[in-house]
Image (cartoon, grey):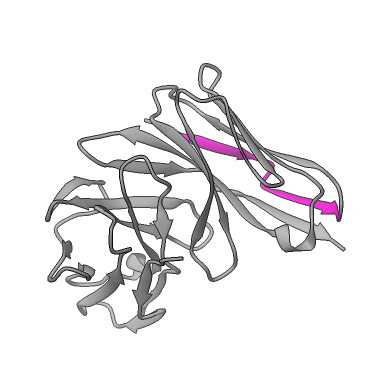
Amino acid sequence: KQEVTQIPAALSVPEGENLVLNCSFTDSAIYNLQWFRQDPGKGLTSLLLIQSSQREQTSGRLNASLDKSSGRSTLYIAASQPGDSATYLCAVTIPGAGSYQLTFGKGTKLSVIP
Amino acid sequence: EPEVTQTPSHQVTQMGQEVILRCVPISNHLYFYWYRQILGQKVEFLVSFYNNEISEKSEIFDDQFSVERPDGSNFTLKIRSTKLEDSAMYFCASDRVDSPLHFGNGTRLTVT
C-alpha cells in the first residue's frame, strides 16, 4: 500500500529565506506527483504536476523535483514571502482503471515571518 | 479561471439523517472525484467517476455512500444515514487526462 510522508510537519522561516519541503513515498510505481497548497478553510490548489518520466517542474519561485527510484520529491521555494504561509501537500497518483486516485501526505505547515 | 464550486460550505446534520453534498465541476473536465479530510488527518480518496459511472472507489466508500451526475453540470455525493465519524471536510475535484486536479473549496460536514 502506498504511503506518503512529509517532513517536517511544520516549518517557520523569516521572510526572504529559501526553503525546501520534503516528500517521500514507499512505492515507486507512480503515474505522477503533485504539490498542492491548502489555505485554512479552503480547498487545495495545485502548484506543480510532475509526470513520472520527468525530473523537475518550475513555476515562478517554485521548483519541484522528483526522484522516482528513491521515492523522493522536494519542493523548493525561493525568496519566501508571508503570502506563502499555508500547508503544502504532496500527493502521488496510483495508475488505475481510466482515472486516477491521489494518495496524500499529511502536509507541511509553513509560516513565513515578516 | 474556471473553478469547481461546492455547496453548501457548511452542513450540520443529525446522526442517521441523509445528506447530499453538491458540486459543479469545471465544464470541459471528464473525470470527477470526491475526497474527504477528517480534521487533523490526511486527505483521503473516496471515489472517482467517469463516463457516468464509478471508475474507482476506496474502502471508505461503502453502501452508505453514492454519487450521481443528475444532469450535465452537477455531481453529487449522498450519505444515506450519517454517522458521527462522517464528520469531515468533503472535497470535490475534477480534471482532464494528464492535467492537474482542480479542487473545490469543500463542504464542512458536521454530524451531531
B50 relative position to A74: left or right: left
B24 relative position to A90: left or right: left
Is A68 above or below relative to A89? above
The boundaries of the magenta stretch are: A3-15
Q: Is residue B38 magenta?
A: no
A41 relative position to B2: left or right: right
Is B1 above or below relative to A22? below
Residue that lies at the very extreme toward the top in this rendered image: A69
Image spot of residue B110 (x, y percent): 39, 76
User: For the point 56% across and 24% down, which residue is it?
Assistant: A55
Image spot of residue A57 (x, y percent): 58, 35
Q: As rendered, which of B68 and B16 lies closer to the eye? A: B68
User: For the point 83% across and 51% down, which residue is it?
Assistant: A13
Q: As rendered, which of A110 and A10 lies closer to the eye? A: A110
User: For the point 48% across and 51% down, which residue is it?
Assistant: B42
A79 relative position to A105: left or right: right
To which quarter of the image does residue B71 belong?
bottom left
Q: Could you tell me which quadrant the C terminus of chain B lies in? A: bottom left
Q: As rendered, which of B4 and A6 lies closer to the eye? A: B4
